[in-house]
Image (cartoon, rainbow, N blue to C red):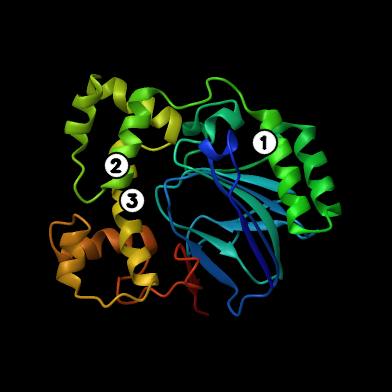
Amino acid sequence: MIARIHKPGLPLGAFVDCLWHYHGHTASHKRERALPTGTVEIVVSLRDDPFRIFRNDSDAQGERFRGAIVCGPQSGHFVLDTSQEESVAGVHFKPGGAAPFLGVPASEFTDRHVGLEDVWGARARELRERLLEAGSSEALFELLEEALLARLKRPLLPHPAVAYGLRQLTAMPAMARIGQVREETGYGAKRFIELFRSSVGLTPKLYCRIQRFQSVIERLARGDRVEWAGVAVDAGFCDQSHLNREFRAFSGVTPTEYRPVADDRPSHVAIDG
């Protein structure tokens, strides 16, 4: 399997966490949960088969997408069809980094998957055609960077209050107090939430909850020795019961049941059967 990750330089590096390319992998399971990360992703299929995405475990119909999609910030997990060989490329944005490329607030994409053609028009189709002809991951990444630079719209950076909030809530989700962070920005609660949702697509509270959850699954995926009461306290949960409730709400499984599909893909969990 080809698995390549590329970290772009500036100016894209201020908005994009990484570009990625996976090819030649067939999963041993037919479906998997994609867990919430608090970020936006562009995913481009390099196969003729459509994407199939399910709202939850019990959704048997799902939605089908061809070409490329924008995966908006999610408040919970959704389910991917992994029955076909994986051949995909994509853009993983930093929190709050996608809005300048989408042309509308990130909140327009919350809990949604939207065809990239509905956002970029014919240029999305042209980009995919060029990606299909790329002879290497390096060439593919160059094409993605070129397309992103062409779409970069002002205002480039998040509002200063949002940027400050993201730094605090991302760096220290276990310790951050949203009320205190908001007060330090100088904005009232309603206005701060509006600014944050527009840029990130989630409320500050939900974003912080997801970052606490992410801090736990990253620790579990590393194979760290686990003492659950300590994990709960370290991640900012009131107690182990609070951790269990939040973990199941975001992942559909308990912490002890959690098994990522790979160590480097902690936000993906196979569904048995």
User: In the rendered structure, which amino acid carries the disc numbered 3?
Assistant: Gln
Mark 3 lies on residue: 211
Mark 1 lies on residue: 148
Front of the two marks 1 and 3: 1
Which residue shows up at 49% across the image and 33% down it? 106
**Are dots 3 and 2 in contact, CB under 8 Å?**
yes
Specify few, some or many for label 3: CA neighbours under 10 Å numbering under 14, 14-19, or 20 or more: many
Specify few, some or many for label 2: CA neighbours under 10 Å numbering under 14, 14-19, or 20 or more: many
Label of residue 169 in the image: 2
Seen in the picture, residue 230 relative to 94 is either above or below; the reply is below
Observer-nearest of 160 and 190:
160
Residue 135 in the image, given as x and y percentages of width and height: 84, 58
- The earlier-in-sequence mark between 1 and 3 is 1
In the image, taking residue 157 as reference, residue 184 lies left or right, namely left
- The earlier-in-sequence mark between 2 and 1 is 1
Mark 1: which secondary structure?
Answer: helix
Q: How many angstroms separate mark 2 from mark 1 (CA)?
A: 27 Å
Label of residue 26 in the image: none
Which residue shows up at 79% across the image and 59% down it? 136
- The earlier-in-sequence mark between 3 and 2 is 2
**Are dots 1 and 3 in contact, CB under 8 Å?**
no
Residue 176 in the image, given as x and y percentages of width and height: 21, 43
In the image, taking residue 39 as reference, residue 224 lies left or right, namely left
